[in-house]
């Protein structure tokens, strides 16, 4: 970032909450994309809780964004499963659930 965007102008203050949520969704997509490209096996899961603790800190917002992200991933042909009490996201391509999912 070379400079602040115009979206931080004082006249846009009433939109900050929406802009923040949009920023979180973009960050979530980036973290999941990196996770998918770096992982070695589809049995690995994305740590939703870690993302939540580091960036969001409001579980309702985390869940709203997660639900949107899961739909996007499913629309790309992947299957998803949220495990570990809602704290882990499995993203896989096979018909069978990943190992460790029960």
Image: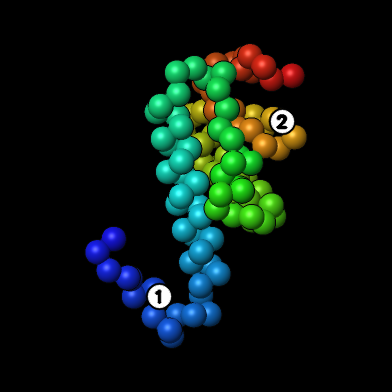
Q: Earlier in the sequence, mark 2 or mark 1?
A: 1
Marks 2/1: CA–CA distance: 38 Å
- Look at mark 1 in the image and give the residue it sits on: 8
> Quick one: quadrant of the N terminus?
bottom left
Residue 74 visible (yes or no): yes
In the image, residue 36 sits, relative to residue 67, either above or below, namely above
Residue 60: percent from left, percent from top: 69, 55
Colour scheme of the rendered structure: rainbow
Residue 19: percent from left, percent from top: 48, 66
In the image, residue 1 sits, relative to residue 13, either above or below, namely above
Residue 79: percent from left, percent from top: 57, 27
Q: Residue at the spot x=70%, y=37% of the render?
A: 86
> Quick one: quadrant of the C terminus?
top right
Q: Residue at the spot x=49%, y=29% of the render?
A: 77
- Look at mark 2 in the image and give the residue it sits on: 84
Task: Tell which of 30 and 69 is nearer to you.
Answer: 30
**View extreme (front): residue:** 54
SS of the residue under disc 2: helix
Q: Left or right of 61: which side holds 74?
A: left
**View extreme (bottom): residue:** 11
Q: In which quarter of the image is residue 51?
A: top right
Residue 80 visible (yes or no): no
Q: Residue at the spot x=32%, y=70% of the render?
A: 4
Q: Mark 2: give few (<14), some (14-19) or many (20+) Cα within 10 Å.
A: some
Q: Residue at the spot x=56%, y=49% of the render?
A: 54
Are discs 2 and 1 less than 8 Å apart at CB? no
**View extreme (left): residue:** 2
Residue 21: percent from left, percent from top: 54, 60
Q: In which quarter of the image is residue 95?
A: top right
């Amino acid at each position: 970032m070379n400079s602040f965007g115009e979206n931080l102008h004082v006249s846009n203050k009433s939109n900050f909450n929406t802009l923040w949520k949009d920023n979180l969704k973009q960050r979530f997509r980036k973290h999941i994309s990196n996770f998918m490209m770096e992982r070695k096996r589809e049995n690995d899961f994305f740590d939703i809780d870690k993302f939540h603790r580091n960036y969001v800190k409001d579980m309702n917002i985390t869940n709203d964004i997660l639900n949107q992200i899961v739909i996007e991933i499913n629309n790309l042909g992947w299957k998803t499963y949220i495990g570990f009490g809602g704290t882990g996201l499995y993203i896989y391509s096979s018909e069978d659930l990943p190992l460790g999912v029960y």
